[in-house]
Image (spheres, rainbow, N blue to C red):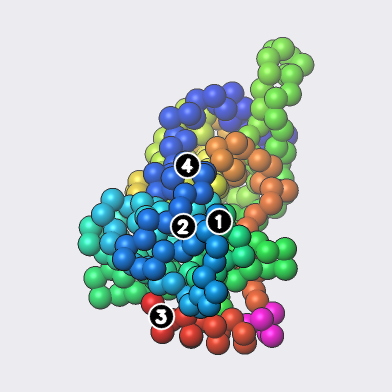
């Protein structure tokens, strides 16, 4: 195996790099809490008899004091939906960098939801400074909620399978195999993709650089925090892209570095890892989020509804 990888022994050394900068945006409280609305008409609780002729929509506003999550939850958005919304806005608004105290959130709710538990806003607007960012709810046939921008573009991030043009997989992913020679449990937390030195390596999804530098075994390595729950690691690089540093935002397909053989590598290759909730998965088979475009008939309906809801925000 000419370009075998010696990242085998390092799987326990990386706990220090597993913080997710976005986790604080999302409440860990999974309970659905009733709305404490800010002046808008209250939504009837599950035990209350619904009014005979409820208004079609309820509009709520909150100002962002501490976090988007806190503001959303003060409007009665449950934690799971708040997480979905946080991801939906992730590409346009970086919650930790872009939001200031006093920025606002507006949301339109169905005033008579089918069941009191689900409390998904039909439309959400973030107002920061003079700019607004809107997303609109669309449920798929299984009733799973997704948020789209006004023109029907999915806010769901898309992920590329491969970060470079490679010639072959020189070492496969494997978890916890007993090495027959040293009699130790070892794992190979990624795949080795053989390619000539200097081949550009690109980000497979947008994200924030969480680590860039040198690590034993990995050599020159970049760790990118992608939209949760994903993160990606690129090791044995010969050099990094100019100007890239910890905290840099990268887009999908943006060149981040170049193939090399730094660290414990016996030939030029990229060691590539995909982690889901900080657990390494086989990058060649892991399920990756893909954009799910609306069908033409859905799209027409969606756009009309989005236009109507926009007028309420
Ligand atoms: Zn490797």
**First in sequence: mark 4 vs mark 3:** 4
Q: CA distance from mark 4 to mark 3?
A: 29 Å
Of the pair 156 and 221, the residue shown nearer to us: 156
281 relative position to 37: left or right? right
Instruction: Report the magenta residues as a range.
Output: 295-299
In the displayed structure, would residue 36 be above or below residue 182? below
Task: Find disc 3 in the rendering and name its residue.
Answer: 312
Q: Which mark is residue 29?
A: 4
Query: Which secondary structure is most common in the magenta stretch?
Result: helix
Q: Which mark is nearer the camera, 4 or 1?
A: 1
In the displayed structure, would residue 113 be above or below residue 13? below
Of the pair 297 and 171, the residue shown nearer to us: 297
**First in sequence: mark 4 vs mark 1:** 4
Task: Find disc 2 in the rendering and name its residue.
Answer: 77
Q: CA distance from mark 4 to mark 1?
A: 20 Å
Q: Quadrant of residue 27?
A: top left
Q: Position of residue 36 (x, y in %)?
A: 37, 56
289 relative position to 13: left or right? right
Q: Report crowding for label 2: few under 14, some 14 to 19, many 20 or more residues within 10 A (C-alpha).
A: many
Secondary structure of the residue carrying numbered label 1 = loop
Q: Position of residue 237 (x, y in %)?
A: 50, 44
**First in sequence: mark 2 vs mark 3:** 2
Q: Position of residue 62 (x, y in %)?
A: 32, 63
**First in sequence: mark 1 vs mark 2:** 1
Q: Report crowding for label 4: few under 14, some 14 to 19, many 20 or more residues within 10 A (C-alpha).
A: few
Task: Find disc 1 in the rendering and name its residue.
Answer: 46
**First in sequence: mark 2 vs mark 4:** 4
């Amino acid at each position: 195996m000419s370009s075998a990888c010696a990242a085998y022994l390092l799987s326990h050394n990386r706990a220090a790099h597993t913080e997710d900068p976005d986790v604080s945006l999302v409440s860990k409280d999974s309970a659905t809490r009733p709305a404490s609305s800010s002046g808008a008409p209250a939504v009837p609780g599950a035990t209350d008899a619904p009014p005979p002729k409820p208004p079609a929509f309820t509009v709520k506003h909150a100002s962002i004091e501490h976090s988007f999550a806190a503001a959303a939850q003060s409007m009665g958005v449950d934690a799971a939906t708040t997480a979905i919304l946080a991801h939906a806005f992730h590409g346009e608004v970086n919650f930790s960098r872009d939001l200031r105290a006093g920025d606002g959130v507006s949301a339109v709710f169905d005033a008579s939801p089918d069941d009191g538990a689900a409390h998904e806003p039909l439309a959400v607007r973030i107002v920061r400074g003079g700019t607004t960012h809107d997303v609109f709810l669309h449920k798929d046939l299984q009733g799973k909620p997704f948020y789209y921008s006004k023109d029907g573009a999915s806010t769901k991030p898309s992920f590329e399978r491969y970060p470079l043009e490679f010639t072959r997989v020189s070492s496969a992913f494997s978890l916890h195999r007993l090495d027959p020679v040293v009699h130790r449990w070892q794992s190979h937390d990624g795949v080795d993709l053989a390619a000539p030195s200097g081949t550009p390596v690109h980000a497979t999804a947008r994200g924030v650089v969480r680590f860039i530098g040198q690590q034993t075994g990995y050599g020159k390595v970049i760790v990118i925090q992608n939209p949760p729950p994903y993160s990606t690691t690129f090791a044995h690089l010969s050099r990094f892209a100019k100007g890239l540093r910890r905290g840099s935002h990268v887009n999908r397909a943006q060149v981040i570095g170049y193939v090399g053989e730094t660290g414990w590598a016996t030939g030029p290759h990229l060691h590539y890892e995909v982690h889901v909730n900080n657990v390494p998965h086989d990058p060649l088979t892991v399920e990756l989020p893909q954009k799910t475009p609306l069908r033409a008939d859905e799209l027409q309906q969606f756009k009309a509804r989005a236009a109507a809801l926009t007028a309420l925000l």
